[in-house]
Amino acid sequence: MHTALKFFTVIIFAFIALGAFAAPPAGVLDDTHAAVRAVMAVQGEVTPALMQQPEILGTAVGLDAGGAPVLTVYVDRDAASVADVIRNLPRTFRGVGVQVHLTDQFHAMSVSHTAKQAPPIQLGTSGGWSKDLANGYCCGGTLGSLVLIGSTQYILSNYHVFESDIVPGGNGIIAQTGDPIIQPGLVDVQCNKNLAQSVGTLVKKSSLPNSNVDCAIAKVVSGMVRTDGAILEIGTISKTTLAASLNLAVKKSGRTTGLSHSSISGLNATIRVIYDNECAGGTAFTKTFAGQIVITNHGKKFLNSGDSGSLMVQDVATNPRAVGLLFAGSSTSAIANPINQVLSFLGATMVGN
């Protein structure tokens, strides 16, 4: 069995302030600033003893909510005794305020977007329809992000990743509501769905060929997807969205190219896109989309086969806003549905902060 990819297809931070806020000092707060050096001096004294506690992962000079330098203590949020550790930390060390930063353990950031994750999974990862094999191939795309419809959470991806198999063909099966959506996709588990895990169940919305968006959703299987919608190497996003603008810096996390960065090169595009019938089959239909977003994609470094379904967000470090849903591309340009068109079609909102 061959494999094929769909082309047309992090750390959560919590701060607990233990000391009183001070007024922010004037000047550039680098390591020559008197207020920063005062914290550094205390940090050097107390860190060796703090680090003897396995629940404490590190310390740093940080800023409190008021913008004043404080001692930040990184505490393992998953430790059994995390509450006791926080309770026993002093509010200050020699007059320097203390701030707890809850986090998971730090790892060298070599992230696999194709590996099977321990649940609850992050998104921006390999995934797809569990029966997406035909014509001697199996296929896969990207589980892009998390959306909310009513009070229920759904995984957002593309129509052609989750449900484009609509006529009996190469494998005699068509996509149905209730079918498992798996992680990783078949393309990354030797075409054997038993090596993957079910993270959602398909809810057919049939966005194509008649609408102006290429989107699909799967109802989250309880406990299998992080409820904050965290995306690999991006983290949690904003629940608000951002309209596209020319030269806007954007990024995405996808199955094939992982975390990639680019900028918007075209607005209100009319684009013709060819869709395959079945997995790696012949042409099923050609669709012309209007009002789309174009993104620079030299050498397919931003979007490549298998990245379909990735969420495109603004390129900022914290709580980026969604801009578009990526679904098509060439060796020079990638195409995204404006995210607000997608959300309107689904009657959904983004899951985020």
Image: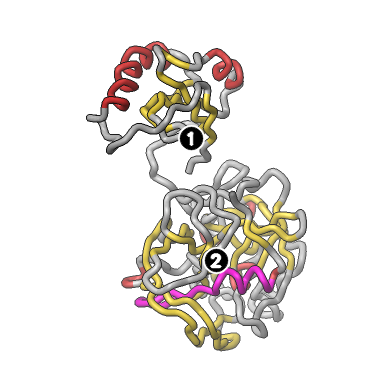
Give amino acid for label 2: Gly
Q: Does residue 330 belong to the magenta stretch?
A: yes
Residues at marks 2 and 1, CA–CA distance in whole angstroms: 37 Å
Measuring from the top left, give residue 84's x and y in whole percent.
59, 16
Q: Which residues are magenta?
A: 329-345
Residue 215, percent across and down?
62, 71
Find residue 133 and report its horizontal and vertical position in percent: 60, 68
Rendered residue at 55%/49% (across/down): 230
Q: Nearer the viewer, mark 2 or mark 1?
A: 1
Report x, y in % for residue 201: 72, 59
- Check whether the beta carbons of the residues at disc 2 and disc 1 lie within 8 A of each other: no
- Which one is nearer the viewer's eye here, 321 or 180? 321
Tag count in the figure? Answer: 2
> Which residue is the site of mark 1?
65
Q: Residues within 10 Å of mark 2 (few under 14, many from 20)?
A: many
Q: Farthest residue to the left: give it.
A: 32
* Residue 331 visible in the shown view: yes
Residue picked out by circle 2: 309
Q: Residue at x 51, y 33 (%)?
A: 104
Asked if residue 90 is positioned above or below residue 307 in the image, the reply reads: above
**Amino acid on which the number 1 mark rests in the picture:** Ala
What secondary structure is marked by label 2? loop
Residue depicted at 55% across the width and 19% down the height: 86
Q: Is residue 80 magenta?
A: no
